[in-house]
């Protein structure tokens, strides 16, 4: 075939495109397990950092992080009833997939959906942190819509179940330099010691418009009002009636026993 033939040029372009698409597809398949493990390590690192069991600034390898998380008292929570459950296998449970499965999730009425998530999975994996047989912290997953993305994080409550011990966001795609400050360690440090609930049990926590002036507020993020409002709404949703309120009520009545002590309580 003539080297100047348009048909030959088209064939070359198609072959190159086919080879490139195959390489991209193969790379995506090969890299997916690595990406998934990195995401798991990042989530686990956030959880371990919130337990209060690791010294500030301590450097742990990825393997040490994953091992440490496995050693925590991890429970499956039925969010609706506020009680622990064995309904699904925690090892294989994927809350994001469950949220899209009508059999494993619940539709949230628009009027109550402050986090703007549409549906909420029926079960959550939560972590209990102990000092001997005394419950020190409860670590709970939270998420909700920001300005551009769904923000995923964990919040740790102290033993009184109203004081925030720590907060962490491990995934978000908010505006660079503005809303992405939800992952700024300095800003997150301001959550420690803040209160969730008022004297009547109502959720009072919020991200302030400016500097925080009360025990129920954290400082706002300059130029990121929409993201800050999203954080306020997601916290208020998750500690309301469609979130962890039933669980908090159960814990206030009955503290669970540490796993391995013959009972898991609740």
Image: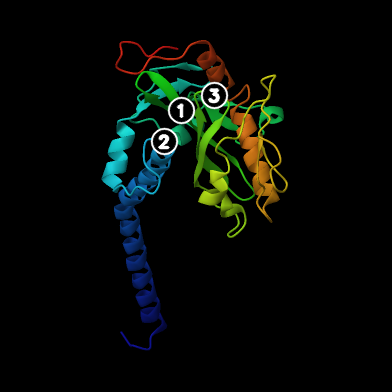
- Looking at the rendered structure, the secondary structure element under dot 2 is loop
Q: In this orientation, which residue lies closer to the viewer: 144 or 182?
A: 182
Answer whether residue 97 is visible to the viewer in this image: yes
Q: Do the residues labelled 2 and 1 touch (CB within 8 Å)?
A: yes
Q: Give the label on residue 19, or none.
A: none
- Looking at the rendered structure, the secondary structure element under dot 3 is loop
- Give how far apart the Cα atoms at labels 1 and 3 are: 8 Å
Report the colour scheme.
rainbow
For disc 2, the marked residue is 52
**Percent x, y for residue 30?**
29, 54
Locate residue 90: give its quadrant.
top left
- Identify the image quadrant of the C terminus: top left
**Disc on the earlier residue, 3 or 2:** 2
Badge 3: few (under 14), some or many (20 or more) residues near its Cα, within 10 Å?
some
**Disc on the earlier residue, 2 or 1:** 2
For disc 3, the marked residue is 161
- Give how far apart the Cα atoms at labels 3 and 2 are: 16 Å
């Amino acid at each position: 075939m003539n080297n100047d033939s348009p048909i030959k040029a088209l064939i070359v372009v198609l072959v190159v495109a086919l080879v490139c698409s195959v390489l991209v597809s193969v790379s995506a398949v090969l890299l997916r397990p690595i990406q998934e493990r990195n995401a798991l390590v990042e989530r686990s690192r956030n959880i371990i950092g919130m337990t209060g069991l690791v010294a500030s600034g301590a450097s742990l390898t990825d393997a040490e992080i994953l091992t440490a998380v496995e050693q925590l008292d991890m429970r499956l929570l039925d969010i609706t009833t506020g009680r622990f459950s064995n309904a699904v296998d925690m090892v294989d449970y994927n809350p994001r997939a469950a949220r899209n499965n009508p059999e494993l999730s619940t539709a949230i009425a628009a009027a109550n959906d402050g986090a703007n998530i549409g549906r909420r999975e029926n079960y959550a994996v939560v972590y209990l942190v102990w000092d001997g047989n005394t419950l020190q912290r409860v670590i709970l997953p939270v998420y909700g819509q920001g300005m551009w993305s769904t923000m995923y994080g964990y919040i740790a409550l102290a033993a009184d179940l109203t004081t925030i011990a720590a907060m962490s966001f491990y995934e978000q795609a908010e505006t660079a330099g503005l809303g992405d400050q939800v992952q700024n360690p300095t800003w997150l440090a301001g959550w420690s010691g803040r209160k969730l609930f008022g004297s009547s049990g109502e959720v009072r926590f919020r991200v302030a418009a400016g500097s925080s002036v009360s025990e129920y507020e954290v400082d706002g993020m300059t130029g990121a009002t929409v993201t800050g409002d999203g954080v306020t709404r997601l916290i208020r949703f998750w500690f309301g009636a469609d979130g962890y309120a039933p669980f908090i009520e159960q814990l206030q009545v009955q503290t669970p026993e540490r796993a391995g002590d013959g009972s898991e309580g609740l």
